[in-house]
Image (cartoon, coloured by chain):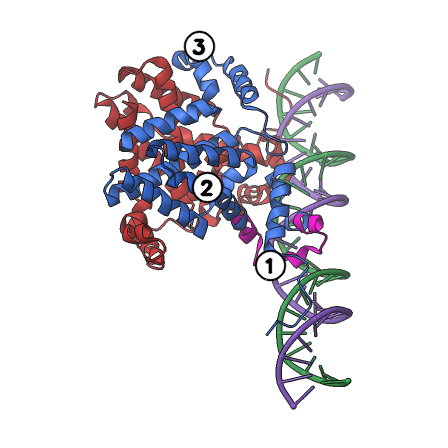
Chain colours: A blue, B red, C green, D purple
Amino acid sequence: MGKPGPKRTLSGDVIVTAALALLDERGAEAVSVRGIAARVGVAPNAIYTYFPDKAAVLRAIVDRLIGEQGLEVLAGDRPWRERIVAVALGLRENLLRHPGAAVLMMSAPMDGPRALELGERLLDVLAEAGLPPDDAARASYALIVHVLGSIALEAAEVDPTKPAPPEAERVAARRLAFAAVPAEVFPRSAAAADVMAAYVSEEQFRWSLGRLLGGLA
Amino acid sequence: MGKPGPKRTLSGDVIVTAALALLDERGAEAVSVRGIAARVGVAPNAIYTYFPDKAAVLRAIVDRLIGEQGLEVLAGDRPWRERIVAVALGLRENLLRHPGAAVLMMSAPMDGPRALELGERLLDVLAEAGLPPDDAARASYALIVHVLGSIALEAAEVDPTKPAPPEAERVAARRLAFAAVPAEVFPRSAAAADVMAAYVSEEQFRWSLGRLLGGLA
DNA sequence: CCCCATCTCTGTACGGTGTACAGAGAGTTT
DNA sequence: AAACTCTCTGTACACCGTACAGAGATGGGG
């Protein structure tokens, strides 16, 4: 019944956990097979017992993060828009906690089972909102694109090797940078510098998501 | 007057061109300092005369691609929405021609001069559309997020080491994959498989962009 | 019970990576 | 002509992903 051979000392899960920790602590470049192996106390190639290659580990990280997002809110009884906003905000918070992971989400097709589940629940909500099935599907993709795009662009600005600074700090840094744009050649950008600095804020996230939802309804 | 030392045999531009060619022909992993150097016929570290490190080369690729997008359409006299759709479609076409580059665009803050120019012109159009300045700025970011997000997610599905197959083929491949989703556990996804297969199509791109524009106006 | 098939993990190795450092040679300035 | 400065080359280091061979543990079948 049981398989022969020694007991496994690891599991895919502890490897993913180690990889994620490495990603958070030291950035994307530090996520190496050797680094992961060292962290779990094993020879580098032992990793290949659990994953066919490094890319598979990265995919597993993505799937883990998608799965961490609870989808119960989507089934709640609040108005449908609020529910969607709630899970979008949850995703944003979760992913900004692992800034290096955002780009991973955009680098591979989202075809894992967790992604499928998220899509299905989104279709539920949109159907409930009264969208015909085809429009609901298109809308669901529009939402995913928008949410992931926002998060990725936002995460692209934070140094992934250290914990993300609070939002106010990130906005302030951008404001400083925008002070340098020459008003005579980019007058509108110069005038809007304050709101452009706040592109990487929850407020902007909510605003644009709200507009998209308005267009979808 | 002139600087001492031998004439430069290269320029940042020819390096970026070589890197882009490598990216198109052999995928992101093939874009190495050594590969670029070999392609332009120079020792690997000669590259460092023109760029401080590899990341700078990648950023320059991004800036080049943004700059390649002509912005004249934005100043035309067609209705403002049409103009925005036109440049979005142009960007999509351009970036899908370099599938490996899409993820680069999401990996670094878009702060090059070309990006600034694009933002400014977008603000022009949105002001003309009647948006108050602050909303125009927020809307401009929402558009960029959406367009880049769509493109990145779309590009994530194509093998960057070979020229992207035509859209019909990519959609067909997805349709095949969706045939495998179990209808009893994901009924809505199964029912919408056809439109989900077409997520990576110009039609979906136009649809969701249209909805967003509707919400912004 | 013993042996064998099987599985996990280790050691070693190969070809690749980014880039630091030192120095050769070309060209301009004095 | 000498001094200086800049570009490029050679060499080197530390690290990467991963292929390969084999040690040792484990369980099943005789």
| Amino acid identity at mark 3 | Ala
Marker count (numbered) = 3
Outermost residue on the top side: it is: A184
Chain of the residue that carries numbered disc 2 in the rendered image? A
The residue stretch that appears in magenta? A36-59
Residue displayed at 22% across by 20% down:
B77
Please name the amino acid that badge 1 sits on.
Answer: Tyr
Q: Main secondary structure of the magenta part?
A: helix
Where, quadrant-wise, is the C terminus of chain B in this rendering? Answer: top left
Q: Nearer the viewer, mark 3 or mark 1?
A: 1
Q: Which residue is mark 1?
A: A50
Is residue B74 visible in the rendered image? The answer is: yes
The answer for how far apart the CA atoms under marks 1 and 2 are is 24 Å
| Chain to which the residue tagged by mark 1 belongs | A
Helix, strand or loop under label 1: loop
Seen in the image, is B71 located left or right of residue B21?
Answer: left
Q: Which mark is residue B130?
A: none
Q: Position of residue B52 (x, y in %)?
A: 61, 30
The image quadrant of residue B148 is top left
Q: State the quadrant of the N terminus of chain B.
A: top right
Within-10-Å neighbours for mark 2: few <14, some 14–19, many 20+ = many
Q: Which mark is residue A183?
A: 3
Q: Of the two numbered discs 1 and 2 on the same chain, state the one appearing first in sequence.
A: 1
Q: Nearer the viewer, mark 1 or mark 2?
A: 1
Residue D26 in the image: above or below residue B62: below
